[in-house]
Amino acid sequence: MGNRSIVPYGPQHPVLPEPIHLDLVLEDEKVLAAIPSIGFIHRGLESLTSKKDFNEMVYVAERICGICSYMHGMSYCLALEDIMNVEVPRRADYLRTIWCELSRLHSHLLWLGLLADAFGFESLFMHSWRLREKILDMFEESTGGRVIFSVNTIGGVLKDMPNEMLQCFVKQLDEMEKEIREMTEIFLTDYTVKSRLVDVGIISGEDAIRRGAVGPMMRASGINVDMRKNGYAAYNDIDFEVITSNKCDSYARCEVRIGEIFQSIDIIRQAVAKIPDTEINTKVTGMPNGESIIRVEQPRGEAFYHVRANGTKFLDRFRVRTPTFANIPALTQTLQGCQYGDVPLLVLTIDPCISCTER
Amino acid sequence: MGQFLPFTKQVIKNLFSAPATTQYPFVERVYPERTRGHVDINKDSCILCGMCMRSCPPGAIKVDRAGKTWSINRFDCIQCGYCAEKCPKKCLSITPGYQEPGPEKFAYTVEVPYEPPKPAAKTVAN
Ligand code: SF4
Ligand code: SF4
């Protein structure tokens, strides 16, 4: 038997500016178990429902996370629309779909950059972030914000994207697609990249289900789950296949996310081709009374929203379970048996967002 | 060897293309028209109703009806645009150009020239 020791890892990650702490039980260089602790940056956003009325909470929900900000705002609105029986105009649904997919694009490009940074490939990191920057410019042009869009409202969206703007975005995405393809080739074929990813952090499909993994983490273990198939916003009009991989390792997670980048571009193309010319929001009156559960597919995986209203302007309960929270048990599984040097990379492969986890 | 080719192509491309970043401060960034930079008020149409103050999520706006002032703490404002949406007179707007940086928080105040309508004189019944 080798030397056993417990090494505290964190709360600062070498790449992420977010605190997650792991107690690693090591035998020499091998990790036997990882015990996570979170709670360093709990912000109490959910309990703000007692101070902010349900309309202001849209802006609070958006601030749960900086990367999936749009989808948090949208899911909150979907839940309230469900409670208040509001029919959202179809154009708003399509615009929401387009913004969701642009968010996915920027999130996955950001993640690829961070991954490159984690294994020390600085120029690849710069290239993926350079490409991501163009998506942020599209956000700024269409919504006015680069990170937080504040474009959702209960009953639809606040800003329309004129058809010329949509066409222009599609053209830009067509050009970007070539560059992204060149860059992602390196992630998938380069020897150094593969040596860090292949057969590292394996989690089987069964384990992924047992540990409640979501999103690309789950799909990289061969499980076909994608909340977009539930058909919120305009996804029921869009034709797409869920991307999965059977390799179950870190390389598979990278592969799934890269596949999703091209899938998102395709979904945007379809949405722009089909977008109808209707209003973009409906006027909502009255107070919400009831309960709703919404599940959406964020870039990092499934997010779960529970909202309960009581007929006043303050909600009874607002509960969010974010994808990273669901992925932490799966992360501890991937860490079992890995080398100590691979820990930062493995933490990164779940695409952690600790701010989301703690709300 | 094959793995070096993509990089060579990129290196040559970078040598002959314009920089990906803007050379600030020599070149200033041009913001798109919709950029949410800061809140502007058209003080002539404000009726000091206080809707903006009540709707602002971080409580950045103060409306003083008696003193006839409207003020905003730009350091608290999160540029969400809810006040502009709620204002009944549409006198608030979010315009490009970010707030000036500063060493401490301060409120930007404007005096509003609004005259509340006089209550109609009661006609005395004979
Ligand atoms: S800015 Fe608009 S909402 Fe605010 S006090 Fe003036 S009129 Fe009312
Ligand atoms: S933009 Fe939002 S945060 Fe800023 S003053 Fe208006 S309501 Fe308040």
Image (cartoon, rainbow, N blue to C red):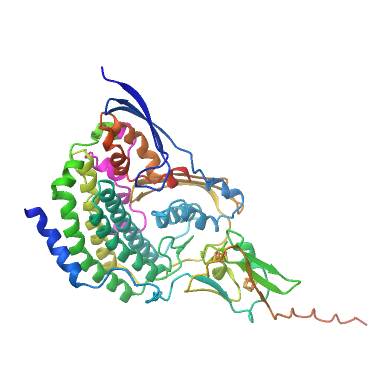
Name the quadrant of the N terminus of chain A.
top left
Compare residues A290 and B61 and report the one nearer the observer.
B61
Toward the right, the furthest residue is B126
Membership of A224 in magenta stretch: yes
Corner quadrant of residue A343: top left
- In the displayed structure, does residue A143 sit left or right of residue A350? right
- In the displayed structure, does residue A45 sit left or right of residue A217? right
- Residue B112 picture location, percent across and down: 68, 78
How many discs appear?
Answer: 0
x 39%, y 53%: residue = A68
- Residue A336 picture location, percent across and down: 28, 29
Figure check: A66 above or below B22: above
Q: Which residues are magenta?
A: A209-238
Compare residues A265 and A94 and report the one nearer the observer.
A265
- In the displayed structure, does residue B98 sit left or right of residue A208? right
Membership of B18 in magenta stretch: no
Which quarter of the rendered image does ligand 1 occupy? bottom right
- Residue A34 picture location, percent across and down: 35, 30
Compare residues A354 and B90 and report the one nearer the observer.
A354
